[in-house]
Structures are given as C-alpha cells and as structure tokens.
Amino acid sequence: MSVQDHPAYRERPQQGMSTKSKAGLVLIGFLIIAGGLLFTEHRAHVLGVLVWLPLLGCVLMHMFMHHGGHGHQHAEPPPSDKRGE
C-alpha cells in the first residue's frame, strides 16, 4: 500500500476564501474600485480636514507632554520638625 492509498492521507478542503478563487478576485477588484471612487469623491473633504491636523497635534502634544496638564502639582509633604521630638 502506498502513502497515497492510506486513509489518513486525503487532501483536506481549504477553509476560508482564497484570493485566487473567482470570488476572491471579484472582491479585490470591487475593493480597489470602491477605494478609488471614495478617494476621488471625498478628496476635498479629506484635504480640508488636513488643514486642522497641525492644530490638533499641538493640543495633543500639550496634553501628553505635560503629563496631566496645568494646576495639578504634586505637593511634597512638609518636612518634619525634629526639634520637637
């Protein structure tokens, strides 16, 4: 009996969708066309938002680089008076 005739040696069906199948190629084509149309139709909106990104970056850097913002100083406990002990 050869290896191919053994009952455990059977090709298992592939699980999931392969990109080489017709459905996978259609899906990839659809996603490319949809992405191109979304980009061309909404380019003005996206580029209009890009103007505000530096301002948003300034605010985010201010918040994260100060580690908590202004007015939240951690006070140290007063030194103990060793003369009275």
Image (cartoon, rainbow, N blue to C red):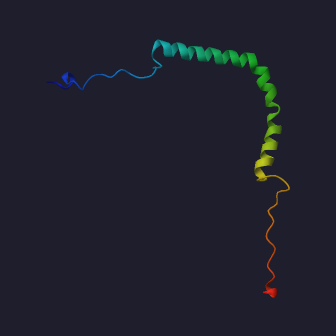
Q: Quadrant of residue 37?
A: top right
Name above or below for residue 64 compared with residue 26: below
Nearest the camera: 45 or 83? 83
Expressed as whole percent of the image width and height from the top left, the position of residue 54 reads 81, 38
Q: Quadrant of residue 56?
A: top right
Residue plotted at (55% across, 17% down): 28
Q: Which image quadrant: the C terminus?
A: bottom right
Q: Is residue 62 left or right of residue 27?
A: right
What is the count of numbered marks? 0
Q: Is residue 51 left or right of residue 17?
A: right
Name above or below for residue 66 compared with residue 15: below
- Residue farthest to the front, as pictured: 85
Q: Is residue 17 left or right of residue 30?
A: left
Q: Which image quadrant: the N terminus?
A: top left
Residue plotted at (79% across, 62% down): 74
Expressed as whole percent of the image width and height from the top left, the position of residue 12 reads 33, 23
Expressed as whole percent of the image width and height from the top left, the position of residue 15 reads 41, 23
- Residue farthest to the right, as pictured: 71
Q: Is residue 58 left or right of residue 38?
A: right
Name above or below for residue 82 compared with residue 25: below
Nearest the camera: 47 or 18? 18
Residue plotted at (78% across, 52% down): 68
Name above or below for residue 55 compared with residue 84: above
Residue plotted at (45% across, 22% down): 16
- Residue farthest to the left, as pictured: 1
